[in-house]
Image (cartoon, grey):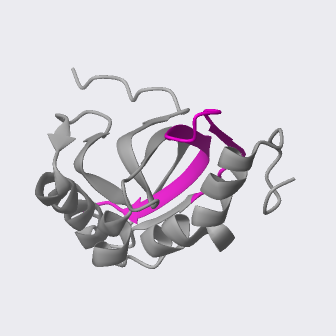
Amino acid sequence: MLNGITAPFVPNAYSLSRALTAGAWSKAMTDKQLDATVSYYAEEASIFPPNAPTATGKNAIRDVWAQFFAMPGFLVTCHPVKIEASRSGDIGYTQGPYDLAFHDAKGNTVKDRGKYLAVWKRQSNGAWRVVADIFNSDLPQAPLAK
């Protein structure tokens, strides 16, 4: 187990796990720390939010997270349950469930849960950064209005 996460022991997965010590990326999201959240992405990264276009590059990713963080009552937690890295040590991934909540226009709490997959790439300085981030809901899609 690495930081409470089950993964086969290979040094590169351990390195990636250490880069995520104590769930720092998830904590940055939960605490709505925009700069800290975005700092985990590589310059050329892409995020694939549900029901929205792909956002590529740190400025576009910053805009996506800023919109989420601006939602009243927004709260998200990610729970990495799998961390793996290639034997070559240059690419890896994390996956797991997330929980999300926000307030709708009437002030009612809307809750969501789903899963995410983040692909990490080791940078030339040895730091791990996300290059692709996708997440989607486990809940059924709401019926279309008639």
Comparing 9 with 97, the one in front is 9
> Is residue 13 positioned above or below 19 on the image?
above
Say whether residue 86 is visible.
yes
Q: Image point 18% across, 57% down: which residue?
A: 58
Q: Horizontal placement of 109 versus 70: left or right? A: right
Q: Horizontal placement of 67 versus 8: left or right? A: left
Comparing 146 with 143, the one in front is 143
Which stretch is magenta?
Answer: 78-105
Q: Image point 20% across, 62% down: which residue?
A: 62
Task: Name the quarter where the C terminus is drawn.
Answer: top left
Across the whole image, how many numbered discs are drawn on residues?
0
Comparing 87 with 4, the one in front is 87
Q: Horizontal placement of 116 versus 1: left or right? A: left
Residue 113 lies in quadrant: top right
> Is residue 64 positioned above or below 47 on the image?
below
Say whether residue 79 is visible.
no
Q: Image point 83% across, 59% down: which residue?
A: 4
Reply yes or no: does residue 104 show up in magenta: yes
Identify the residue at the far right of this view: 1
What secondary structure prevails in the magenta region? strand
> Is residue 4 positioned above or below 36 on the image?
above
Comparing 9 with 139, the one in front is 9
Q: Position of residue 37 (x, y in %)?
A: 37, 68
Q: Image point 12% across, 59% down: which residue?
A: 59
Q: Position of residue 33 (x, y in %)?
A: 36, 79
Q: Position of residue 116 (x, y in %)?
A: 51, 40
Reply yes or no: does residue 62 show up in magenta: no
Q: Horizontal placement of 129 versus 71: left or right? A: right
